[in-house]
Image: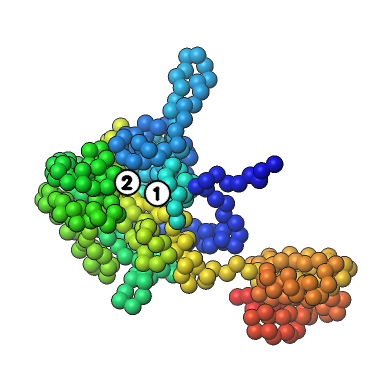
Amino acid sequence: MSTLKAVRGTRDLLPPETELWNHVESTARRIFARYNFGEIRTPIFEDTTLFARGIGEETDVVSKEMYTWEDRARAASEKAQSLTLRPENTAGVVRAYIEHKLGETGLLQKLFYIGPQFRRERPQKGRYRQFFQIGAEVIGPATAGSESPLRDAEVLEMLAAFLLELGLPPANAVAPGWRLAINSVGSAADRPRYVAALREALREIAPTMCEDCQRRADTNPLRVLDCKVPEDQPKIDALPKIADYLDDASTAHFTAVRAALDACGMAYTVNPRLVRGLDYYTRTTFEFTHDAGLGTQNALLGGGRYDGLSEMLGGPRAPGIGFAIGADRLVLTLQSQAAGSAVGSKADVFIAPVGDAQNPAALKLAQELRAQGMRVEVGDGTFRVKKSFEVADKLARKIVLLGEDEVASGVLTVKDFASGEQRKMTQVELLATAR
């Protein structure tokens, strides 16, 4: 009988790695709360039409990567519904914004989410068919300030604060780190003009480019700018630039975003090729990359403004901006840096009862220490002392030997594995060492 394994392109997350995942997620919740974001939880699957209309039928996501199926009708009068595991969550959040009439509050909605997404793409380092994202959206009526360049800059500054809190600083001349690239893809009127110019420029050179570029030149020319094939780079660099097709309002908006980032001391570069291939993006687009830990696929997160998405989905006008963090890639980056090892995976203490008779006292001591916030593992009185030390060294930073004398006196025998020091201390003193 063959051994069952996880489906290709998925994997199990196990301790102690899950401790780092929890650290990342709790840090996100803490930082986002400072910026007045609240959590939204949308369904893992949605009506397929949501993604076809929102993301774009000609995108790779919709045309090749979605997990879609027909849901059986429950009655003869019902029509089967096409459902899709969510490949991203912006469309779902905007759908919820429309469905629950959040725009009628007249207030800016600042929403974040944490959860799995699904795409049927080629598995590679940091990229899985079930992957996890941490994302946020700022959306609302224009009268609430949702179109303001300040919203764009605030989101970017929040992301920088989040990465710094995780122990990932920006890159500098002597050390690797994250880098921010920004661009503007213009308004809903600017973008079609640019796409037309791009398609025309690609007409002659596309046949000489890679297979993906040849296909995208016809179906989604913007995705050609994402090509990583070395031989195609000089050709792509010679293509028209989006900045030459922006109207005055889009140019002024991008200038104001940059001014706000400059005021906050945010380092960034303007990348004219950063257009992002999803149909709903307008004006500001951005991407954070990292110099180490991810190889050639070095993007940590990305996002942008989507001022017309609500209308595309049948809702009211509701300009917005959002992002999605590739949590899988972020964890890989943290694991490759000192920031990852800073998250401890060992218990504070391992309590080793010396003899079966001390088992009840060991459990009571563990209960009291845990109630004070310590992380505690309990051995068993059947263990020989040598075995207790061996197990404790793997699981905890300290071992507490609990024999008859310790139970009677309340004075514990404690050894610190890092220093090698062994001494007597009270329970209060032991608690103090963990703080």
Q: Which quarter of the picture shows residue 330? A: bottom left
In this rendering, the answer to whether 410 lies above or below 246 is below
As drawn, is 311 to the left or to the right of 61? left
Mark 1 burial class by Cα count in 10 Å: few <14, some 14-19, many 20+: many
CA gap, disc 1 and disc 2:
8 Å
The image shows residue 293 at horizontal and vertical percentages of 43, 65
The image shows residue 156 at horizontal and vertical percentages of 31, 59
Name the amino acid type tagged 1: Leu
Mark 2 burial class by Cα count in 10 Å: few <14, some 14-19, many 20+: many
The reply to whether the C-beta atoms of the residues labelled 1 and 2 are less than 8 Å apart is yes
Q: Which residue is rendered at x = 77% and y = 67% of the image? A: 379
- Return the residue at label 2: 139
- Return the residue at label 1: 111
Q: Which quarter of the picture shows residue 369? A: bottom right
Q: Which residue is rendered at x = 46% and y = 22% of the image? A: 80
Q: Which mark is first along the chain, 2 or 1?
A: 1
The image shows residue 225 at horizontal and vertical percentages of 24, 50
The image shows residue 223 at horizontal and vertical percentages of 27, 46
As drawn, is 282 to the left or to the right of 72? left
In this rendering, the answer to whether 210 lies above or below 83 is below
Q: Which residue is rendered at x = 78% and y = 72% of the image? A: 387
Total labels: the figure holds 2
Q: How is the image coloured?
A: rainbow
- Could you tell me which secondary element the residue under label 1 belongs to? strand
- Could you tell me which secondary element the residue under label 2 belongs to? strand
Q: Is residue 149 visible?
A: no
In this rendering, the answer to whether 250 lies above or below 426 is above
Q: Which residue is rendered at x = 71% and y = 66% of the image? A: 377
Which quadrant is home to the N terminus?
Answer: top right
Name the amino acid type tagged 2: Ile
Looking at the image, which is closer to me, 394 or 427? 394
